[in-house]
Image: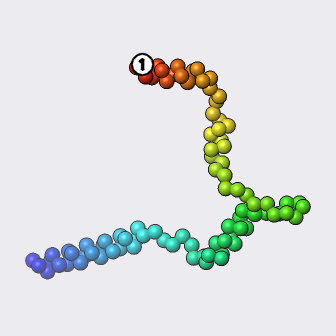
């Protein structure tokens, strides 16, 4: 009976080890620090017609679309809807 229990525990331990190997997060990249900086530089900079370097700034573009798609509202309608919600 103890032999079966020991085998079951070893099997469970092996299955757990295999599970964590599969679920582990792989290394993001094997690039060195210099390679990462160079990749970032090449991605975010360019030269214009005058020969000057232009660097892009990291803006969130999704917020820009939210602002453009939102409809301007009258302040009084906002207050009215808030007041109606409180009264309910």
Residue at 25% in and 73% down: 12
The residue tagged with tag 1: helix, strand or loop? helix
Q: Is residue 83 above or below residue 34?
A: above
Q: For the point 46% across and 19% down, which residue is it?
A: 84
Left or right side of 69 for 24: left
**Residue positioned 57% across, 76% down in the render:** 30
**As drawn, which residue projects farthest toward the right?**
50
The N terminus: image quadrant:
bottom left
Q: Position of residue 52 (x, y in %)?
A: 85, 63
Q: Position of residue 4 (x, y in %)?
A: 15, 77
Crowding near pointer 1: few (<14 within 10 Å), some, many (20+)?
A: few
Q: Position of residue 61 (x, y in %)?
A: 66, 48
Q: Is residue 53 left or right of residue 71?
A: right
Which picture quadrant has residue 55?
Answer: bottom right
Which residue does the numbered mark 1 point to in the structure image?
87
In this rendering, the count of numbered labels is 1
The quadrant of the rendering that contains the C terminus is: top left
Q: Is residue 35 left or right of residue 23?
A: right
Picture coordinates of residue 48 (x, y %)?
A: 85, 60
Identified at 79% across, 60% down, the residue is 54
**Left or right placement of residue 68 versus residue 16 in this view:** right
Residue furthest to the left in view is 1
Residue 86 location, quadrant: top left
């Amino acid at each position: 009976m103890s032999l079966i229990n020991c085998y079951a525990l070893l099997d469970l331990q092996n299955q757990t080890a295999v599970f964590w190997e599969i679920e582990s997060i792989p290394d993001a990249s094997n690039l060195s620090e210099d390679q990462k900086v160079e990749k970032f530089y090449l991605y975010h900079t360019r030269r214009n017609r005058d020969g000057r370097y232009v660097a892009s700034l990291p803006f969130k573009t999704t917020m820009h679309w939210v602002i453009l798609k939102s409809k301007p509202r009258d302040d009084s309608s906002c207050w009215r809807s808030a007041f109606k919600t409180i009264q309910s």
